[in-house]
Amino acid sequence: MHLICPECKNEVDLSRYPNLAVGNVIECDICGISLMVTSINGEEVQTEIVDEGK
């Protein structure tokens, strides 16, 4: 699966989330922002910002 962080524009490593599903909260390993998964369409993951991070 593929996700670009909406905050820092880097690719998020989703390998830490093997059972990713809509509603899960994940963290960008680059900027630390928390993102909630809003949809998964094939390999493309869409998120919205939940917390502004570190």
Image (tube, rainbow, N blue to C red):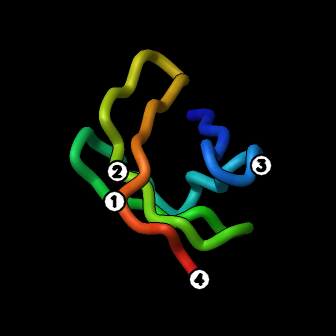
| Extreme residue in the left direction | 23
Q: Which mark is residue 10?
A: 3
Mark 4 element type: loop
Mark 2 element type: strand
Mark 3 element type: loop
Mark 1 element type: strand
What is the distance, in whole Å, between disc 3 and disc 2 at their CAs? 16 Å
What is the distance, in whole Å, between disc 3 and disc 1 at their CAs? 17 Å
Q: Amino acid at mark 4?
A: Lys
Q: Earlier in the sequence, mark 3 or mark 2?
A: 3
Q: Residue at x 34, y 50 (%)?
A: 36
Q: Which mark is residue 54?
A: 4
Q: Amino acid at mark 1?
A: Val
Disc 4 or disc 3, which is closer to the eye? 4
> Contact, CB < 8 Å: mark 2 with mark 1?
yes
x, y percent for residue 20: 36, 47
Q: Residues within 10 Å of mark 3 (few under 14, many from 20)?
A: some
What is the distance, in whole Å, between disc 4 and disc 2 at their CAs? 16 Å
Disc 1 or disc 4, which is closer to the eye? 4
Determine which residue is flagged by label 1.
25
The image shows residue 27, relative to residue 38, as above or below, that is below
Q: Which mark is residue 17?
A: none
Q: Amino acid at mark 2?
A: Met
Determine which residue is flagged by label 2.
36
> Contact, CB < 8 Å: mark 3 with mark 2?
no
